[in-house]
Image: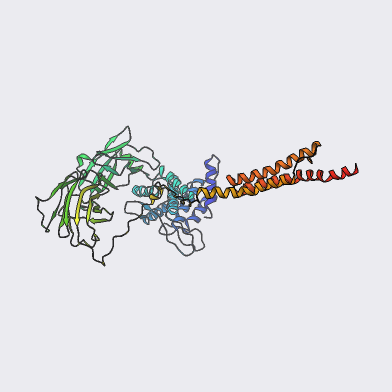
Amino acid sequence: MDFYYSVLSLFYIKQQGSSIVLLDADVIFDSIKAHGQSDGRYRYDSDNSEPSTHAAGIALETLAGVLSLADSDMDQSKIEVVKNDIVKLFDSIKSYDDGTLYFDEKRIGDTEYRGPLATTASVVHGVTAFAAIVSGKLEINGDKMAGLAKFFLSIGIPGRTNDIYIQLESLSCLENNRISIPLILSFPAAVLSLSSKDRLKADVTTVFGSAAPPLTVNLVQVFSPDSEDVPILENKELQCDPENSIHYLDLLPLKVDVGKYILFFEISLHDPDHLNIYATGGRIKAFFFFTGIIKADKAAVGIFDTDAENAVALQKLDLSRDNTVSLAANHLKKMHLNFQLLTPLGHTFKPHQVFLKLRHESKVEHIFALESSAGKYKVLLDFLGLVEKFYYLSGRYDIKLAVGDAAMENSFLRAIGHIDLDLPQSPEKAAPPPPQPIDPYLRFVPKQEISHIFRAPEKRPPEELSSAFLVLTLLPLVGFLIGLLHLGVNLKGFPSSSVPVFCSILFHGGIGAILLLYVFFWLKLDLFTTLEALGLLGVFLIFVGHRTLSHHASTPTKLKTT
């Protein structure tokens, strides 16, 4: 690490056209090599640090920079020692079952741990940089380079931007290196339909999608989950489509059935010279899933007294559509249902899910799982043993059959018909049917219209009594008018000048307005509206009444002075 950044900085400057020579290249080379271990790993420094695979990649990249900056050719024996160390380093490579290869190192004490991505990237950078500087070729199996490329491609898109940079930089080192350029075999689709006559398609490119040299893709072996030791198909060459750069194979002549298969491929280069340039990856393992139409055959249902079936009493079913079979039974009867599922090649098919559902008219459901026996699915419902499970509910039960599987393109939920069950009365201590779940969408349905019923009007008094009460109410007003006539009220004292006349008219008009307000309050106005208007009229009457009364009070005094 002491030389890494300094040497690489000088190396990048030299790449821009500057003339830079490292005079003590031999000394620096030996100083870096002194940190190497017998297994190909290196230490970061001389302070008794633990050997690290990640440090080996940094050391190899630094050694490559020293060789490019040296003023003379380096001792070839030293370079051969480094080459041997690289071979030993690749002996510690780790692998997955699918051929993916990677480097990793153990967690030791408090040292910083770098995961497989950073460690593998460091080794790839160092090895490809060293191979680009030295003469000759490193003795590294090309399949290992292909396995490393598969590792960087299989991790997808990392979550951190730093890891994305490491991934892309490592792939760029593998895209063009002097050891072996990995060729990647990819498949546009791993799920193929037999009913649609899909083709098995393969594409071969470099890690960055560049075109591959002329080659042939061979389907070496095909294994099914039922016969993992014996291949069901061998040695089929994929046809090449030069226009689309795709290799393909028709599935129909292969006589493969639905299900999951393990396929092994090999890539063969046409030009023998390309074997020293490209890495094909050896035998490539891929998983494929074939789907198709499953045929439901020999389906029948019936009611019997015993376990033995009577072929005459069975009613045939067509499971390609809904059925309307009508059955009737009591608790002493038994219901039989059987059918057979066949693949496109006529083999017995066993799906993941096979259920029989009985739904009571009260929406209580009962589900029964069907098991396969001798290549057929059978179910026997003994109603005598199911009365408690059925909660002693008599009545109509709708019957439906559900069959589903990932390889089945025509998974179905078919109506079989219905059965009218006559079950005995439930005992007192029998468990009640479970409450049915409430549909959450019911809260959005239109609500029932609310019809408000007003209180019935109270009984009113007779019309004669109401008229008599009105007359009694008007008697005080009549008495008031008689009193005015008896007192000799007249208009002789009404003001004659213009301003007092105007104020007197407004004053009397205001009193009349208050009396009219009382009439409107009795007819239609509410209390708050009446009080608001009365307050405004009161302020008005105070003003004009004061002027009017002031004029009347001053009139006698003027007459006396006159």
Looking at the image, residue 458 sits to the left or right of residue 288; the answer is right
Q: Residue at x 45, y 60 (%)?
A: 51
Q: Is residue 341 visible?
A: no
**Residue 371 x %, y %:** 20, 56
Please tell me how many numbered marks the rendered image carries.
Answer: 0
**Residue 454 x %, y %:** 46, 50
Render colour scheme: rainbow
Looking at the image, residue 57 sits to the left or right of residue 144; the answer is right
**Residue 142 x %, y %:** 35, 47
The one of 155 and 512 positioned closer to us in this rendering: 512
Looking at the image, residue 354 sits to the left or right of residue 181; the answer is left
Looking at the image, residue 113 sits to the left or right of residue 262; the answer is right
**Residue 193 x %, y %:** 26, 42
- Spot the residue most to the right: 561
- Spot the residue most to the top: 243
Quadrant where the C terminus sits is top right
Q: Quadrant of residue 2?
A: bottom right
Q: Quadrant of residue 197?
A: top left
The one of 524 and 481 positioned closer to us in this rendering: 481
Q: Is residue 123 visible?
A: yes
Q: Quadrant of residue 494?
A: top right
- Spot the residue most to the front: 486
